[in-house]
Every structure is written in structure tokens, then in C-alpha cells.
Image (spheres, helix red, strand yellow):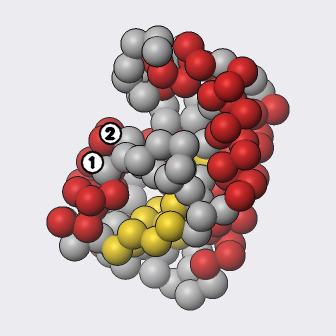
Amino acid sequence: MDTDIGFKAALEEAKQGASEGGVPIGACLVSAEGKILGRGHNMRIQKGSATIHAEISALENAGRLPASAYKGATMYTTLSPCDMCTGACILYKVKRVVLGENKTFVGGEEHLQRKGIEVVNLKNAECEELMKKFVEERPGDWYEDIGEGSK
């Protein structure tokens, strides 16, 4: 499977989110056959939503799929997935989660692994820089996004 297609799309989505004034996190769900099922970016700020994180956006943009469509799928995300997005990956039984980085935020990686989902950290400097810049410039929006009060 070509891992570049999913990660490239997720990074493009993160940059799109940043250009819209949102949280710069992107995601892309890719089937076992290497076909993009859905891609999206964090839309909490743009849509005034409590739940539209990047992984949720990618699942939403994939549309209603039969459970079999997720078998063997990989969720690419530019940042370690939060508990909500971790839960969505578990619910839909994705096989693997590939994350751009986890220096900015460590989400549910251990829980994914306990559930038998492979986790791969690319330790991508571009993803890290996007998030670092956002957190420094807009800490209130960041802490709201991860369900914490302002620090």
C-alpha cells in the first residue's frame, strides 16, 4: 500500500484548515486497496462545532459506508488522535492509524494499540511546525479544541 497518498492528503487538509483560520489538523481515510474513502480537516472554528475534528471530518466526507469498507483501512492524521477520534477509529475498526506527529499532543495511541490497531508515528517536522505555530499564536483555541480550559 502506498502510504504517501493518505499522508499527503492529510497534510494538504491541515494546510487548508490553517488557511481558513482553523486548527491545522488534517486526516484521510484510505481503504485496504489504497483508495481514498474520505478526507477532511478540523472544522470546529469554521463551523462553530463541538465535534468536527479532522478524523471525524474525514469519516463524514467518506459518507455512509458498509462496515466492510473500513476493514483493513488506514486513518492518516497529522496529529495524534484525541479520545473522540480514537474512539471513532476503534468503532469503525480501522486497521492502522498513521500520525504525522505526537510532540504537540499525545492522544489515544496506547488505547488504539490495546484494541489491536497498529499505530505509526511519522515524526513529521512540517506537521509539528504547523501545530507549534498554532498553539503559540492561539492557545485559547487550542485548549478548547482538546477539551481543556485555557492554560
Q: Position of residue 59 (x, y in %)?
A: 46, 50
Residue tagged by mark 2?
84
Q: CA distance from mark 2 to mark 1?
A: 5 Å
| Mark 2 vs 1: CB contact within 8 A | yes
Label 1: few (<14), some (14–19) or many (≥20) C-alpha neighbours in 10 Å: some
Measured as percent of width and height from the top left, residue 63 is found at 47, 50
Tag 2, which secondary structure? helix
Crowd class of label 2 (few under 14; some 14 to 19; many from 20; radius 10 Å): some
Q: Amino acid at mark 1?
A: Gly
Which residue is tagged 1?
87
Quadrant of the image for the N terminus? bottom right
Query: Disc 2 marks which amino acid?
Result: Met
Q: Residue furthest left?
A: 114
Q: Is residue 122 above or below residue 89?
A: below
Local SS, label 1: helix
Left or right of 105? Residue 85 is left
